[in-house]
């Protein structure tokens, strides 16, 4: 009886080890350029992944947990310039996101919650802050171009 129990547990361990292995996967375009690469566990994306355009340039990179984007991600244009970056939580954009202009400078940055603007958006032109807006659930509720008034009406702790 003890031998049968041991044999069963041993076979169960082997099966779990075989089917629950973390493995690195690479997927390619028809032109043989890499399309995506990263870690899988039980056919779900986990850990760090990179995605590429058909021309071979990096499109985006970040972490997954159970097939959902999580933590900090970076996005790039086809010419490799930075496009945007920000936080994900369980597959939804949350917290601060930065958006870049064609010169690689921050164009605007916004607080998001569940993929919607929710909090402040700061708009820049030529690296200079020109406007601030406040959103709630995707709808603009206030806008400022006078920053002394903006500071007076808002706590700077809200910008963290």
Image: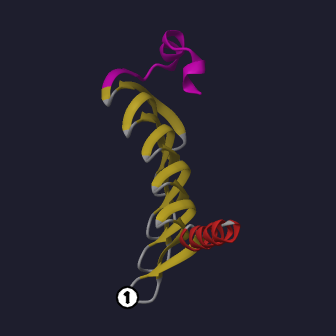
On-image quarter of the C terminus? top right
- The residue at the point 51 percent across, 44 percent down is 126
Image location (x, y in percent) of residue 136: 35, 24
- Residue 59 location in percent, x, y? 47, 66
Q: Which colour scheme appears in the figure?
A: secondary structure
Q: Is residue 120 above or below residue 54?
A: above
Q: Does the magenta stretch include residue 72?
A: no
Residue 15 location (% of width, % of height): 57, 72
**Taking 95 as reference, is 134 left or right?**
left
Q: What residue is shown at x 55% (from left), y 69% (from top)? A: 38
Front residue of this view, candidates 12 and 55: 12
Q: Which of 82 and 89 is in front in this view?
A: 89
In the foreground, 72 or 66: 66
> Seen in the image, is 128 located left or right of residue 114?
right
Identify the residue under disc 1. Answer: 30
Is residue 104 something one can see in this rendering?
no
Magenta segment boundaries in residue numbering = 140-160
Location of residue 144 by image quarter: top left
Q: Is residue 141 shown in magenta?
A: yes
Task: Classify residue 92 as left or right of residue 41.
Answer: left
4 in relation to 72, above or below:
below
Furthest-top residue in this view: 152
Q: Which residue is drawn at 69% across and 71% down?
A: 3
Quadrant of the rendering where the N terminus is positioned = bottom right
The front one of 145 and 122 is 122
Q: Is residue 119 at least partly visible in the picture?
A: yes
Q: Is 4 on the left or on the right of 52, as rendered? A: right
SS under mark 1: loop
Bin the neighbour count of mark 1 within 10 Å (Cα to Cα): few under 14, some 14-19, many 20 and up. few
Vertical placement of residue 45 versus 157, above or below: below
Residue 4: image location, x then y, percent: 63, 70
């Amino acid at each position: 009886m003890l031998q049968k129990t041991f044999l069963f547990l041993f076979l169960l361990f082997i099966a779990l080890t075989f089917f629950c292995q973390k493995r690195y996967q690479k997927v390619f375009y028809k032109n043989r350029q890499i399309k995506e690469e990263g870690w899988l566990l039980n056919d779900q994306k986990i850990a760090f992944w990179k995605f590429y355009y058909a021309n071979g340039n990096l499109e985006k990179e970040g972490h997954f947990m159970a097939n959902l984007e999580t933590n900090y991600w970076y996005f790039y244009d086809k010419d490799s310039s930075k496009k945007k970056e920000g936080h994900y939580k369980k597959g939804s954009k949350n917290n601060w996101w930065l958006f870049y202009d064609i010169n690689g400078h921050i164009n605007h940055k916004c607080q998001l919650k569940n993929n919607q603007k929710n909090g402040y958006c700061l708009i820049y032109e030529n690296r200079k802050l020109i406007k601030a807006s406040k959103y709630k659930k995707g709808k603009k509720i206030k806008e400022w171009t006078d920053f002394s008034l903006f500071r007076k009406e808002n706590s700077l702790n809200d910008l963290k």
